[in-house]
Amino acid sequence: MVIDKKGLAILGSTGSIGQQTLDIVRAFPNNFQVIALAANNNIYSLENQIKEFKPKFISFNNDAENKHLLQPYGYFNSTMENMVTDPDVDIVIAATNSCSSLIPIIEAIKAKKDIALANKESIVMAGNLISKLSKENNINIFPLDSEPNAIWQCIKGEDLGVYKLILTASGGAVRNQKISDLSRLTPKQVLNHPNWEMGSKITIDSSTLINKALEVAESHWLFNIEWEKIEILMHPQSIIHSMVEFNDGSIKAQMSHPDMRLPIQYALLQEKRQINPNLKRLDLKKINQLNFEQLDKNKYPCFELSLETLKLGHTWPAVLCGIDETAVELFLKNKIQFNQILTLIEKALSIHRPKQNPDIQQILDSFNWAKKEGYQLAKEL
């Protein structure tokens, strides 16, 4: 049987999700062809990826050190917009940090390319625009985040009987910490996630639960579910990634070993389940228990603030994403304490003047304003 290879454009190829996406390509070489690789500053990793996958396009930060290492390969430094609209590309993997892939995602949708979405900031900030464009162009948005991906798997094959979505949260590195000790946490401590291996930004966001608020918004837009029908449940083991409760009271859960390659594989193979010997299988006999707890709002105050901000729409989500990015950066540099992430976000939100029904440029301007303003506000802490 001949399998038509899907052409992939991987935005953020040297990051955690990008590298795990390439693991799936290696596992299924007859299914995929890497057409484009976009990195930022990690030229060494990009060079190795070029040698292995020989893409048609590459993109990188033109100010990156060691960019001269790429000269012998004869590539022109392409824009991500040019890469994602190429006729050979079938699926665009949006796995960049921040909102750098927002415009490329928009252009890819207009060019009728399916999107495999790990960059949740884009749909959080521009959910209304992206949802509208995806319907107009009849394209698919495949969630790569483990929780929305799990919801997708649970809903598959069901009719319109969803009562609520249940996203699980591990609580990150702070789940066993006393509230009184949070101000003394170091970046090294917070980056030590008990279950997942992720990039530093998302690991910090997993400990403030801002990441979980973003996933609520992502699920709201991806599955067209009312905010009030999305619930968060603390689940320390990270075995059940999400659940869907249906109108008749039945609950479906997606369970697997915590490994991002599994949701990536499900998305890229477009719901076809195939054996991958490189993925660890879940052994239920070795699991002593599965625990579920109510979210402690006193330990995770950023969650409620973030969720209420996201519900406001307009440019509020962009400002939240922007100030959170600056707050995490400052914490990682030991410029602010862990509990001051909340304080900094509150200050930025208090002075924001929202734009109603913003276009893409206004969304990006609001994001960049919040990022920049955060550095000034941090001086007042």
Image (cartoon, grey):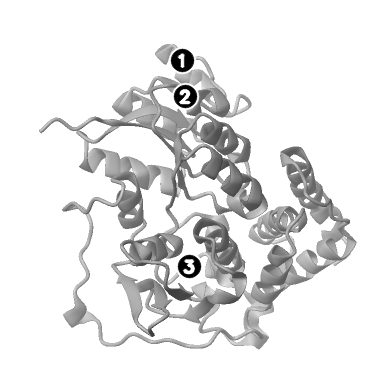
Q: Residue at x 58, y 71 (%)?
A: 209
Q: Residue at x 55, y 77 (%)?
A: 174
Quadrant of the image containing the C terminus: bottom right
Q: Position of residue 5 (x, y in %)?
A: 26, 30
- The amino acid type of the residue labelled 1 equals Tyr
Left or right: 311, with 112 as reference point? right
Q: Which mark is residue 75?
A: 1
Left or right: 3, with 74 as reference point? left
Residue placed most toward the observer, 147 or 64? 147
Residue placed most toward the observer, 246 or 222? 246
Q: Alpha carbon of mark 1 to alpha carbon of mark 2: how far?
A: 7 Å
Q: Residue at x 46, y 19 (%)?
A: 70
Q: Which residue is mark 3?
A: 192
Left or right: 227, with 308 as reference point? left
Front: mark 3 or 1 = 1
- Earlier sequence position, callout 2 versus callout 3: 2
Q: Position of residue 138 (x, y in %)?
A: 47, 40
Q: Which residue is mark 2?
A: 58
Q: Quadrant of residue 328?
A: bottom right
The secondary element bearing badge 2 is classed as: strand
The outermost residue toward the left is 1
- Earlier sequence position, callout 1 versus callout 2: 2
Residues at discs 1 and 2 in contact (Cβ within 8 Å): yes
Q: Alpha carbon of mark 3 to alpha carbon of mark 1: how far?
A: 38 Å
Q: Position of residue 175 (x, y in %)?
A: 52, 81
- The amino acid type of the residue labelled 2 equals Ile
- The amino acid type of the residue labelled 3 equals Asn
The secondary element bearing badge 3 is classed as: loop
